[in-house]
Image (cartoon, rainbow, N blue to C red):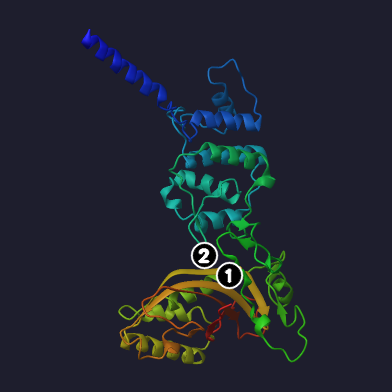
Amino acid sequence: MKNKGIRLLLISIILTATLLSPFKVKAEPEYVKTGTFIRQLVQAMKLDVDSTVKDPYIDAALKAGILKLDQFADYNGYITTTDAAVLLNRADEHLHKGTLDEKLYKAVLENRISDIKKIPKKKRGDVAKVVAKGIIKGYSNGKYIQNRSFKGNEYFTKTDAKVTLIRLMNQSKRAKLSPDGQLIRTTNLPKNADQYEYILECFPNSFYEKKFRYQRTKYHYKPKELIDYASPVKVIGTMRSLTVIDGKMIYLNDWTDKLRLNLSTRFNVDYRTIDNNWLNNLSSTYYLFEKADLNKPLFDDIKEYTAFVKKNKVKIESEIIAVEPSTMYYATGYYMRVYAKFKVTSPNFDKIKKDIIFYNYVSDTKPLVEGKWMECVFDVRIATRNGSSNGRDYAVRAENIVVYED
């Protein structure tokens, strides 16, 4: 009887604990299965479905060319973002007959997806297209980073499926991209957003709100817009002698590339490796005359700087150089805005003049600090010595860069 009473007590305790414990429901997976996504895609597109066949949605997707035979080994497995992108792009081409701008597609494919090489080659085109179309945004790589990661090997979530299907069917809901494939934002805009054609997601408001050079200039007369100055949104109106087609300066990308090479060279200096290749890279970004003797002062100046670097064991390294062509403005010359994150070291740092540690000194109200990562935003002039230029030979001016705090 005693043992029976103990057993009853234990049973009572177990039952009480079970009743008092919270009932644990198995969490529903956040990812979407391949078969489910295909069904959702077919339903969103309102494709004809034959309910008499074994797999009606698979059958409908195959007939529309959205799904290829043997594309998936298992429709019950979770679909990856890459495979979802392939299906979405085929669906978009089926619906909208391929209206993608080729230059935009190329810009995205070559420059705007940081992990594109992790995606199988045969699927990269579809991935770049859904990004260029604004159907899939990707993920930010941080402020001032002008590409985004795609994370194609990760599983597609149910939220991803819902959002992308809305964008597929309603083109007005798609993300907006700049002509060179960068994500545009339309909320939390800078105070002077009307001075720009668009505002990029990866650049903070402070980048845009920094004063233009003409806003710092003290004029002795009343300056005239489109003659003495022009904001980025109106700068094309000053390019009367330059080659402009369909409202676009056709050499703008060339100017941007030249400026990026110039700053990437100047902000990456190593006394142990600096050589003629470094000199040639840098000199190629400035305006060069056809006669070598006219270019001699420039080359002599750069050689003098390389000797200084070697003597003082100077090292400059950059983490980010962001050149943004949509910021180009006019202030009796063309300027483009840049962000740089860099670090300077030298055993003679405290002894040498700071205004020569860079080639064409970057002047700042904040003093350089050795070994510390520093950030600055500044404007660089693009110009030519050719009075009849159509823009083809524009290059970086060799004048000092000045950085203002505001």
- Which quarter of the figure has residue 44? top right
User: Of 337 and 101, which appears nearest the observer?
Assistant: 337
Where is mark 1, residue-wise?
207
Tag 2–tag 1 contact (CB < 8 Å): yes
Residue at left 65%, top 80%?
389
- Residue 196 visible in the displayed image: no
Residue 144 disc label: 2
Query: Nearer the N terminus, badge 2 or badge 1?
Result: 2
> SS class of the residue under badge 1?
helix
Compared with 149, 18 (above or below) is above
User: Of 158 and 151, which appears nearest the observer?
Assistant: 158
Mark 2 neighbour class, 10 Å CA radius: few under 14, some 14 to 19, many 20 or more: many
Expressed as whole percent of the image width and height from the top left, the position of residue 209 reads 63, 71
- Please give left or right for residue 265 compared with residue 394 in the image: left
Amino acid type, label 2: Tyr
- Residue 330 visible in the displayed image: yes
